[in-house]
Image (tube, rainbow, N blue to C red):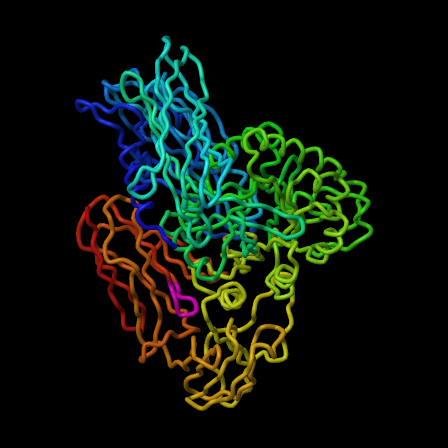
Amino acid sequence: MKLGNQLITGILIITLLAMGYNIDGQSVGREVRNFNHDWKFYKGDVSDGHKTGLDDSGWRLLDLPHDWSIEGPFSNDNVSCTGYLPGGTGWYRKTFSIAEDEKGRKVFVYFDGIYNNSEVWINEEYLGKRPNGYISFQYDLTSYINFGKENIIAVKVDHSLFGDSRWYTGSGIYRDVKLIITDPVYIKQWGVCYTIPEVSPEKAQLSVDVSILNKTSRREKLEVKNTLWFGNSIVGEVAQKTTLGSLSEQVINQVIIINEPRLWDVDDPDLYYLVTEVEGRKMVDQTVTPVGFRTFRFDAEDGFFLNGKNIKLKGICMHHDAGSLGSAVPRKEIARRLDILKEMGCNAIRTSHNPFSSDFLELCDIKGFLVIGEAFDEWELPKKKWLTGWNRGIPGKEGYAADFKEWAKTDLRDFILRDRNHPSIIMWSIGNEVDYPNDPYTHPILNTEANPQTWAKFDEKLPHANRLGEVARELVAVIKQLDTTRPVTAGLASALMSNETGYAEALDVVGYNYQEFRYEPDHKEYTDRPLYGSENGMSLEAWNTVADNDYVMGQFLWTGIEYLGEARQYPSRHSTSGMIDLAGNKKPEFYFRQSLWSEKPMIFLGTTDRITDRTPVSLWAHKRVEPHWNYDQGKNISVNAFSNCEEVELFLNNRSLGTRKMADFQNRTISWDVPFENGTLRAVAKNNGREVAYDELITTAAPVKLVAISDVTSLKADKEDLAHVFLTVCDEAGNVVYDARNEISCEISGPVRLLGMEDANPVNTEGYKDKKQHAYHGKLLIYLQSTDKTGKVTVTLSSDGLQGTTVQLETTE
């Protein structure tokens, strides 16, 4: 990927404009302040939490983003669907001031996401409520601000109905907050929108709409200017004069022509930066918008095309939490996870099953991922939420359905308006498995065919599925009013039922969840329907239906990274369906998928003593092998190699056990049955007889010591920078002991804070926020975040009976 100068320039432009222009010491234009720091928090309800005179001196001082659910405790008294972690009610308060000389300007507060049912007050004045926990929103504070004096903003978050989702959501102000100050003539929220009517290797046309508001009592003569940057160069600009009436809004359209554009794609995600400026007697407002020039096309016969090139969507589904961090995930951790997915060969992500953060989408733009932005998991009727274990007991019915009729169209509009400039987004999804058979909708057609996820048959006591088509058409119409450049899709759990109700027909591109058997008959019957696997199991057969059929655009595996919730019986806390675990460790299935999706030569060795059990056991079955070489002497072991190379030679203690060709193994797994003996198992992958990759497993002794390394040596003292410390439990020779589960203690001196310790053990319900955690598979991940102080940092890691270790860091300006 070529991030290079255009990324650096973009960051500099954004930073400068966020600070605001400065004339004679006074800010003009737009100023965007980080509003994350120094909030007061109280877990519980407070009757007068919005009152300015409230004594909050005993409240906890913290920085946002913040998720109180992840602070625990895990408890069987909570519910399995959200990982046995608590919800409840919480209050946040912040005291801040706006200078007296800013009077006459506009002041807004912008929340990227609060889960959920948030209510906001400023100086005791009520601003509003937002039930949806995934939607970004903004309030105008101007009328209530005491310029030159203290102001108090208060936020109530009501997640008391904590079993309201099928997976972990988190609780609180879990995304960034910004304070935005503008002149009274300003660019509307999400008011810059671009489309690309024409793009070719020779020329591109960028069409920009700028929505400007005039909140003054006079007419304003303005100049609207758009400048397009690539790297350190201006590649196009256009300016236009206009007059904007008092208390009015105007949309200005401008077109920039670019010669020989650099195209955005998954391998070279070249980004331009559009600087939009509005000037009157002085600088009035300015924003920066990343721009990616690309074309895409969905063909019912030939699949998906990006910039004229036919490619398969090698996708994964993904939830928004990150284990011990909960839903308050720092940008650097999102970036790390995306890098791991890239290494696997993944090029596409479906956001499961709600809008993700702005950070996530910006990073997908930068790193080159194709994204399906998904709006809802349920519509006007609730789905089952399992409370005592996945598919066990009596389910709950709390959730977004209670707010759908009142809020769905508003939420959907704001979702599209916020995200429609991202080149990474290629489709909008209006729902996930809203048509799940008998949960809640039913239809007589269910009696004619077994659904792969359920054997449900028509139940006349349940709501009829015809309503699905009606709602789908309403939601599609909302999107088309705002964006006609991308198709609308959905993940269908029962294409059989949705074909009968008008739901599938309402979509531009149709996603099938676990229904590969329907691809061929539906392709023949609905000849103009582009289709793909919107949610799929891990089997090779599921991938072959994509690879072997041009008309199938791709697949989105369930799931890329493990996530909290959707858990089985306590103490199970999270789903184990990921190819990557909660700590970002690569599971065997990661390497099997890499052997299918990546072109870089690779090989992975895994072993099992279950040599008679080699068949999948469910839609979500994973490769049941482990990367270790520790068994009883002489026991017969199945050794398995995943590779994208032509052949593999296996060695045991430098003794060749023979070369085997991938072409001879239809399941894409080369296997040997080997009597165990201590030592080193080494596999060498070859192309054209030449060694191109290798992997090895070494018999390990008992744990003796801890080894730790940080991914950085210094942190920026900004309260946001992140370090990952990777700890392993090793034997005397330094080999990771795969079955080690020693308890690790972490002590820190210096200006960093411990954000969490992640072991990725699905049945470990130890608290996430103390200074102790057990290792799992010989590993532990430790998250450290900077404070606003500079200095030396020492991280001391210890475990009873083992040699400890330290990690040295520093924080700098």
Position of residue 421 relative to residue 542, above or below, is above
Position of residue 436 relative to residue 808, above or below, is above
Decide if residue 264 is on the left or right side of residue 523.
left
Q: Residue at 26% across / 35% down in the picture?
A: 16
- Which quadrant: the N terminus? bottom left
Decide if residue 801 is on the left or right side of residue 574.
left
The image quarter containing residue 99 is top left
Measured as percent of width and height from the top left, residue 350 is found at 54, 49
Q: Residue at 38% across / 63% down in the picture?
A: 780
Measured as percent of width and height from the top left, residue 391 is found at 65, 54
Q: Name the foreground residue: 272 vs 69.
A: 272
Q: Residue at 65% across / 72% down in the picture?
A: 615
Q: Which residues are magenta?
A: 774-780
Decide if residue 387 is on the left or right side of residue 200.
right
Q: Name the foreground residue: 635 vs 185.
A: 185
| Residue at the outermost top position | 218
Measured as percent of width and height from the top left, residue 515 is found at 69, 55
Measured as percent of width and height from the top left, residue 797 is found at 28, 64
**From where the camera sits, is residue 801 visible?**
yes
**From where the camera sits, is residue 190 visible?**
no
Q: Residue at 59% across / 77% down in the picture?
A: 663
